[in-house]
Amino acid sequence: MEIFILILIILCIYRAISNKKELIQSGFKSYKNLEAKKSELEKELRELEDTYKINKKDYLKFKEETKMQVIKEKSEEINEQIKLLSEKETSLSNKVFDLENKFKKLNAIDFGVVPTDFEFEKSETYKEKLKNIKLKESELLRKIKSNKSTEVTINLDKLNRLLYNAFNTFCDYNLSRLTFKSYPTRQNQIHTNYNKLNRLVKGVTSIDEKLLDLKLEELESSYAYYKLKEEEKEALRIQREEEAENKRAQKELERKQAKLYKEIEALNIAKDKVNDKLLAAKDDEIEALRLELQKLEKEISGLQDEKTDIDYRVENTGAGYVYIISNIGSFGEEVYKIGVTRRLDPYQRIQELSSASVPFKFDVHAMIFSYQAYQLETELHRYFDSKRLNKVNNRKEFFNIKLEDIKKVLDLHKELTFDFNPDFEAEEYWATLKMIESDEEKETN
């Protein structure tokens, strides 16, 4: 009985083991199938991602092309509209121009109102032609004046036309001859002609005084315009001179910068060679080589300091020299020019100012280096603004002041170091005065 039970137990165990083995094999098979399915799904996913990327790229490309096409079409449409508007504008401008001309012809010519934008030729041939015409006109007027005066009845409207025509023509002539010096003369002549014409037609008619006021206003406006144009030309000329001066100074500084770089590089090479010699030098050669090395290091240090200063001036265009100069022979006593220059050698600028434009050389009373030279110059100009010689053009840097007053202002800047020379050397001027005195004495004797 026990044996039978044992056999049953063994059979049960065996069957359980067999079932477990089958389950394991079945599970392993299912796992393999799932792995294969997973690989297939991953492959499909990658294919879908690749397809998505390709489709997205095509979509973006299509979108950009569509956008560019829309922009192009819209741009062409706008350009077409601009072209049409431009044509309309040109057409309207032409119509306005024609109407203005017709208006001028119908309403202005009869009263002698004509444009004043004369452009006279300058050639000698044209001058001769004008001279001959003037002679013929004078001859004709003499013949007319020689005729005996006869009373003539004339329509008042026609008389007014002749009167206004004469006055307007005369005013236009004066406008065409206007210069800075002739402004008072032109103003006086218009007044004189106005009174003269009114006297000729006294008791019959007269030129409206409002027209006289308008003509004088036109003359004044023309004078102001010419004056402003001249000032603008002068300002532009000075600006160009300053720009040229700054460019010249900048190039000079850059050349000096490059030269210093090469000199320092050469000295460093020489220094390296001396160091190499020291390594292999004998006892009696060491001292001489060390002295030579110290000399080279001192030279390099000096050049480095100079290069640092030049580097700063190249990068910072505000650094330069403010100069105080006078020219007693040209401008008299207590007249000083306060200017600025970026030149490496500021005295070169003074030599240029002492060129053929003035009869005598300038004396230098102060040469002040500043890292804010233009700011310092502006400060001095503002301080002495009321003492300017030229009240109209502030670019003229001459001031009627005492030298002591300039020094007092400069002394407020404790950071500045400079020598102040109060003497007026003016060698050529004093020598010239002596020669004049000598010539006068000879004439007297």
Image (cartoon, rainbow, N blue to C red):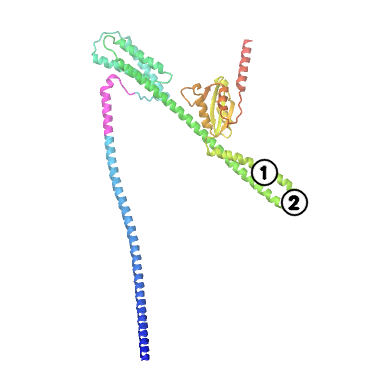
Q: Which mark is residue 296?
A: 1
Q: Is residue 254 visible?
A: no
Q: Which mark is residue 42?
A: none
Name the residue type under label 2: Lys
Left or right, 245 with reference to 424: left
Q: Residue furthest right?
A: 284
Up/down of 247 relative to 359, above or below? below
| Neighbour tally class for label 1: few under 14, some 14-19, many 20 plus, Cα within 10 Å | some
Comparing 300 with 445, the one in front is: 300
Which quadrant of the rendered structure holds the C terminus? top right
- Is residue 98 a member of the stretch shown in magenta? yes
Up/down of 94 relative to 50, above or below? above
Dot 2 or dot 1, earlier in sequence: 2
Instruction: Give how far across and how far down residue 69 sits, in percent.
Output: 30, 50
Instruction: Give how far across and how far down residue 254 sits, in percent.
Output: 55, 39
Which quadrant of the rendered structure holds the N terminus? bottom left
Left or right, 311 with reference to 119: right
Residue lying at 28% horizontally and 27% vertically, measured from the top left:
101
Q: How many marks?
A: 2
Residue lying at 27% horizontally and 17% vertically, measured from the top left:
161
Instruction: Give how far across and how far down residue 5 sits, in percent.
Output: 36, 89
Tell me the element at label 1: helix
Q: Which residues are magenta?
A: 92-115
Labels 2 & 1 near each other (Cβ < 8 A)? no
Up/down of 141 relative to 259, above or below? above
Name the residue type under label 1: Leu
Q: Determine which quarter of the picture holds residue 357.
A: top right
Q: Which mark is residue 282?
A: 2
Tell me the element at label 2: loop
